[in-house]
Image (spheres, helix red, strand yellow):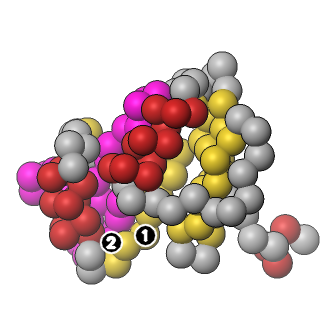
Amino acid sequence: MLGDHDSMATVGVKDLAKARQFYEGKLSLKPTGEQEPGSLSYKTGKSTLFVYESRYAGTNQATAVTFVVGDQVESIVRALKAKGVAFEHYDLPPLRREGDLHVGGDMKVAWFKDPDGNIISVAGT
């Protein structure tokens, strides 16, 4: 039923202006032309990231959005760090830490938070 349809990541934020600075300035996302009041929409590859104002922003304790970046994960992590993005470090056996990356087999992943504490990851090989 739903497997034939696209889905989108949806992230609640408290301050839309601060979110815009982060998502556009730090993550280099480009807004789509379709903006609804109280929300932002970004095209990310073949998907959409929808950011909206919510009083419940930042209450999710799990990853909200994952960007699958393939073999660019290390260079993207370096570029984000150069823009001032602070990465989270977790104790997740059997993954081992290599700088800001958590590595297990061919998988490499790094986590960071937006200004409201929403957890975002970049993952690749």
Instruction: Locate residue 95: give its quadrant.
Output: bottom left
On the image, the x and y values in percent for residue 84 come to 20, 43
Q: Secondary structure at mark 2?
A: strand
Q: Residue furthest left?
A: 99
Residue located 66% across and 31% down the image: 53
What amino acid type should be assigned to the residue bearing mark 1?
A: Val
On the image, the x and y values in percent for residue 11 come to 60, 42
Q: Which callout, 2 or 1, points at the residue further toward the start of the chain?
A: 1
Start and end of the magenta stretch? 96-125
Residue located 51% across and 62% down the image: 30
Residue located 9% across and 52% down the image: 99
Q: Residue furthest top?
A: 55
In the picture of the structure, the residue carrying the numbered disc 2 is: 124
Residue located 74% across and 59% down the image: 34
On the image, the x and y values in percent for residue 87 come to 23, 43
> Considering the image in quadrants, where does the N terminus appear?
bottom right
Main structural element of the magenta stretch: helix, strand or loop?
strand
Instruction: Locate residue 56: give its quadrant.
Output: top right
What amino acid type should be assigned to the residue bearing mark 2?
A: Gly
Q: Please state if 59 lies on the left or on the right of 37 as rendered.
A: left
Please tell me which residue lies in front, 66 or 17: 17
In the picture of the structure, the residue carrying the numbered disc 1 is: 68
Is 76 located above or below residue 125 in the figure?
A: above
Are the residues flagged by discs 2 and 1 in contact, CB closer than 8 Å? yes
Q: How many marks?
A: 2
Q: Is residue 97 magenta?
A: yes
Mark 2, Cα crowd under 10 Å, few <14 / some 14-19 / many 20+, is some
Q: Please state if 120 lies on the left or on the right of 86 as rendered.
A: right
Using the rendered image of the protein, determine whether residue 43 is visible from the camera's viewpoint: yes
